[in-house]
């Protein structure tokens, strides 16, 4: 019998989320356990063992594992990567520090840019020069290369980046450097800028190569260790890794280009949100993923998340472009802020309440976790406001400590601010909600979008609990909370498609494009992508071609789809028309003037997997768990009906105030909400509508069940 079981594993800053899917048995089984920061693979292997035991699955039945991780991002933010050396063309070793020679904030006299990953004494130039047209101006001095690399090796470098001038047009010198280093220093990892980011832009290309080299040794150890752990568990299934652009790749490719995993975990959430939106027929959705450490917001239109090909990593200021390190790779376009369940709340020097970006993480975690945390967090506030059940957190596996959370919040926040503890808790939630709302408004306004025209799709361990308040702040009237919301990123891992993205720079006015050379570039990109994907059936392959274009003289580009056929003089007018249409969609108008093509792109993709997020947990209990007092934004403390999501009946309509609990997350909705339960137990919520009275109980055949009595509020199911 063929193997059918697939497992998705997403390692976050606070929790590690897992999902086992077996279509043969119709099984979708989630898991969540605290991340082990000192050794991330420990939580991964422990979670997989638990899933296999709970579902009676043999290791040999596993057909594939897909892994998403925040390890690359954390390594960058914490500056715990490798010691890297950089080789540049002579005279250009300081370009990494000079950057764009602009200040990201001209009004802040104390503003400091993000520091390069490679210090000046480890950035060295070598003789040899390639011209802008790809011709050789000066031959490579191989003796100088060996001497410089020997010097860097003596200084203890652990990885080497090579970024020579115009290597995107002619990578011959970089390839020769790689071969020389491989013979002289066979154990030294080498990253070529022409391989990781073959695009015009010396500063950005060099920065991408340096970041890849910076995280490569650590990620290679992590991925090899995970592979060894799986082998020890007798799991011999392929291990795939989530890419920042929403596709998945092989283990070897991930080890070679770990920079492409920079937004691996967050991208999985956006892919899952897009899949849910397509299932529900929703065209315009704001994806809201709030975990224990951060909140991620992305736009999904037409059933697909928006992508971009330039990214800033490790920003000094999250909201200020130019304050981070530029990276050239395909990523899901999202904004990420330090607002999560573990975000620490405290008054600042001016006596104002601040929440985040510092996080308690998994260890020590929120005070209520009882793992040594002493600083109150958003989770502690949620617990005191009634949004979380202390006895039913993680399905009862983890008991929350209400008294300790109350003491910490009183000591650290309420007392210093002169507030009642309940008011301080409500203030924490309000501050974190407004921080996320501000980020969402900015992200959508940059794209010319109004949040009110979108539905809010909430997931992550903390996302559903804060979706109602965020929707109210953004004036969004429709909220969607899928089943398995707490492990949606793991769902996205299993739904993602194997993908290869290729790009080549060939700057030219559109009217003067050398179409024969463009055809050769596409042949090269197609050949490489096919080699990477190794599709069994060519009919299953989906190919998308595009170009980065701009008006002549502009310093920014927009991506425009180009035809697969008639890519030549015959299709010139179609390409120009497509560019102007796309430009108007972004900026509201088009301009007169010549158009320039900068980069040509190819994306090759195999089909993904359809995955339902509903079902599979044992059923047979009661839907109603009683009532409890809950604080709702704008309404204060109200008695809310508590529902077991696993026992809801599809097609049911409920009214707020209500709380819906499942093992991995809880969500709450105020009295101005109508909640509809879909066939797969997704909650579709209408907010601020003229509501007809409906019973807040689950209807049964022959009538309507009355709400559970208050005396049963804490009765276990």
Image (cartoon, rainbow, N blue to C red):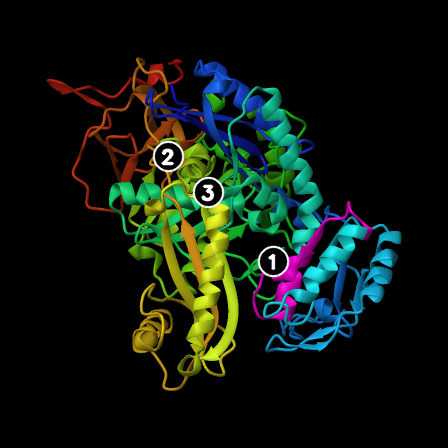
Q: Is residue 352 above or below residue 142?
A: above
Q: CA distance from mark 1 to mark 3?
A: 25 Å
**Residue occupied by mark 3:** 268
**Residue occupied by mark 2:** 668
Q: Is residue 321 above or below residue 59?
A: below
Q: Earlier in the sequence, mark 1 or mark 3?
A: 1
User: Which residue is at 22% across, 23% downward?
Assistant: 698
Nearest to the observer: residue 327 or residue 255: 255
Q: Residues within 10 Å of mark 3 (few under 14, many from 20)?
A: many
Q: CA distance from mark 2 to mark 3?
A: 24 Å
The image quarter in which residue 22 lies: top left
Q: Which residues are magenta?
A: 184-210
Q: Earlier in the sequence, mark 1 or mark 2?
A: 1
**Residue occupied by mark 1:** 195
Q: Secondary structure at mark 2?
A: strand
User: Which residue is at 64% across, 68% downward?
Assistant: 167
């Amino acid at each position: 019998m063929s193997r059918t079981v697939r497992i998705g594993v997403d390692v976050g800053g606070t929790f590690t989320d897992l999902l086992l899917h077996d279509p043969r048995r119709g099984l979708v089984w989630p898991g969540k356990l605290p991340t082990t920061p000192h050794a991330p693979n420990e939580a991964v292997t422990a979670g997989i063992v638990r899933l296999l035991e709970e579902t009676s699955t043999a290791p040999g039945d596993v057909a594939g594992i897909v892994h998403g991780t925040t390890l690359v991002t954390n390594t960058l933010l914490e500056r715990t990567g490798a010691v890297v050396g950089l080789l540049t063309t002579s005279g250009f070793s300081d370009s990494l520090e000079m950057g764009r020679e602009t200040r990201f904030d001209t009004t802040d006299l104390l503003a400091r840019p993000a520091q390069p990953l490679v210090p000046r004494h480890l950035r060295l130039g070598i003789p040899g020069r390639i011209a802008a047209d790809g011709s050789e101006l000066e031959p490579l001095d191989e003796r100088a290369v060996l001497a410089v690399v020997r010097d860097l090796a003596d200084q203890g470098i652990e990885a080497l980046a090579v970024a020579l001038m115009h290597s995107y047009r002619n990578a011959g010198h970089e390839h020769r450097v790689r071969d020389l280093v491989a013979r002289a220093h066979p154990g030294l990892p080498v990253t070529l800028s022409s391989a990781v980011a073959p695009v015009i832009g010396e500063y950005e290309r060099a920065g991408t190569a340096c970041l890849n080299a910076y995280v490569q040794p650590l990620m290679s150890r992590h991925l090899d260790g995970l592979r060894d752990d799986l082998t020890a568990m007798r799991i011999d299934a392929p291990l795939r890794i989530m890419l920042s652009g929403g596709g998945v790749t092989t283990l070897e490719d991930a080890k070679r280009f770990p920079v492409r995993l920079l937004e691996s975990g967050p991208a999985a959430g956006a892919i899952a949100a897009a899949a849910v939106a397509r299932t529900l027929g929703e065209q315009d959705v704001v994806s809201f993923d709030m975990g224990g450490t951060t909140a991620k917001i992305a736009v999904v239109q037409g059933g697909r998340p928006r992508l971009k090909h330039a990214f800033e990593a490790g920003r000094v200021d999250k909201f200020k472009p130019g304050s981070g390190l530029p990276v050239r790779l395909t990523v899901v376009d999202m904004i990420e802020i330090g607002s999560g369940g573990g975000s620490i709340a405290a008054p600042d020097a001016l006596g104002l309440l601040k929440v985040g970006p510092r996080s308690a993480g998994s260890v020590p975690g929120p005070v209520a976790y009882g793992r040594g945390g002493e600083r109150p967090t958003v989770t502690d506030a949620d617990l005191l406001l009634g949004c979380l059940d202390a006895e039913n957190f993680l399905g009862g596996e983890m008991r929350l400590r209400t008294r300790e959370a109350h003491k910490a919040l009183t000591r650290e926040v309420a007392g210093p601010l002169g507030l009642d503890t309940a008011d301080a808790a409500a203030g924490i939630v309000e501050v974190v909600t407004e921080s996320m709302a501000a980020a969402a408004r900015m992200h959508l306004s940059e794209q010319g979008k109004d949040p009110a025209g979108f539905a809010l799709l909430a997931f992550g361990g903390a996302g559903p609990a804060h979706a109602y308040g965020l929707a109210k702040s953004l004036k969004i009237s429709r909220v969607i909370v899928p089943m398995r919301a707490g492990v949606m990123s793991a769902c996205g891992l299993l739904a993602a498609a194997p993908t290869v993205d290729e790009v080549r720079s060939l700057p030219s006015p559109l009217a003067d494009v050398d179409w024969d050379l463009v055809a050769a570039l596409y042949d090269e990109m197609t050949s490489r992508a096919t080699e990477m994907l190794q599709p069994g059936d060519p009919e299953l392959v989906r190919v998308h071609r595009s170009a980065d274009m701009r008006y002549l003289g502009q310093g920014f580009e927009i991506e425009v789809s180009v035809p697969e056929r008639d890519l030549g003089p015959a299709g010139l007018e179609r390409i120009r028309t497509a560019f102007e249409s796309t430009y108007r969609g972004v900026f509201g108008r088009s301009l007169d003037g010549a158009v320039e093509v900068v980069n040509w792109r190819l994306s090759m993709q195999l089909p993904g997997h359809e995955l339902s997020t509903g079902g599979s947990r044992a059923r047979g209990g009661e839907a109603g768990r009683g009532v409890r007092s809950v604080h709702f934004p704008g309404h204060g403390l109200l008695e809310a009906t508590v529902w077991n999501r696993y026992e809801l009946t599809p097609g049911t309509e409920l009214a707020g105030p209500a709380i819906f609990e499942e093992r991995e997350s809880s969500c709450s909705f105020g009295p101005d909400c109508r909640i509809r339960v879909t066939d797969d137990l997704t909650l579709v919520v209408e907010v601020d509508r003229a509501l007809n009275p409906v019973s807040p109980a689950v209807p049964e055949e022959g009538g309507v069940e009355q709400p559970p009595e208050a005396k049963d509020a804490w009765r276990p199911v």
